[in-house]
Image (cartoon, rainbow, N blue to C red):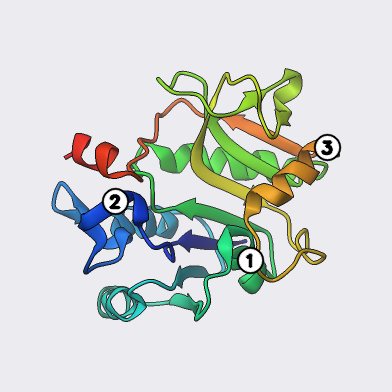
Amino acid sequence: MNILVLAAGYGNRMDDLTKNIPKPMLKINQKMLIDYAIEIAQKISHQRIFVNTHYQNQILESYIKENYIDIFISHEPNILGTGGAIKKIQNDDLLVLNTDNLWQETFVNEIKESINFFNENEHVENLLLVNSNSEIFDLDMKNKNIINFPSINHNTRFQGCHLIRNKSLNHYPDIFNIQDYWINCSIEGKLYGYETFSVNPHVGTKELYLKNQ
């Protein structure tokens, strides 16, 4: 299994905070968001860790190369969207981590358990880590943990982490958002949620970022 850390976005929701630096390099508790994600990824069994880049890529890539070894950069001269970013590097099952979340050490075991579930249930094409004790919900999880997407009713929240089967995006365009795949995956009954106990704070907007300072 490979791991992809998503770090290519423009950071528009951060307003002026990302005028001169990419969003993954913003800090909470004196630690960059990209560091939270990479450090979690390094604790998970993997073949390769990828980080995709686009906005202010030279700053981010220099930082990664100076501070980490064996991290593969997937630069996107033209931004590919979350689905295109996955398709570009996918040659194995893939764990995808957002840098919009404040990754906690307690989440490592939950990710490992979700990987075990994913490996044992081959009918699951895409497994979203979710939490039903969050203050805000954005997904609908039915019986047997099947996710309805797009969701009209909301009873759980995406935790910024998901697992996706190798070759599952072969027939998709090179530029697209992963939610397009989730729609088709949901129609086929292959989009599942994995309930976590740890709440993984979302800090992807200026308001939420400042709230977590």
Tell me the number on the disc at residue 73.
none
Whether 144 is drawn above or below 209: the answer is above
Image coordinates of residue 176 in percent, x first then y, are 65, 61
Three-letter code, disc 1? Gly
**Image quarter (top left, top right, bottom left or bottom right) of the C terminus:** top left
Q: CA distance from mark 3 to mark 2?
A: 34 Å
Q: Which residue is found at the position 55% from the left and 23% from the top?
A: 156
Q: CA distance from mark 3 to mark 1?
A: 21 Å
Provide residue 35's location: percent of width, then percent of height.
29, 59
- Nearer the observer: mark 1 or 2; the answer is 2
* Numbered circle sitting on residue 84: 1
**Quadrant, the N terminus:** bottom right
- Three-letter amino acid code at the position of disc 2: Met
**Image coords of residue 82 (percent x, y):** 57, 59
Seen in the picture, residue 87 relative to 194 is either above or below; the reply is below
Query: Which mark, residue 187?
Result: 3
- Residue type pointed to by label 3: Ile
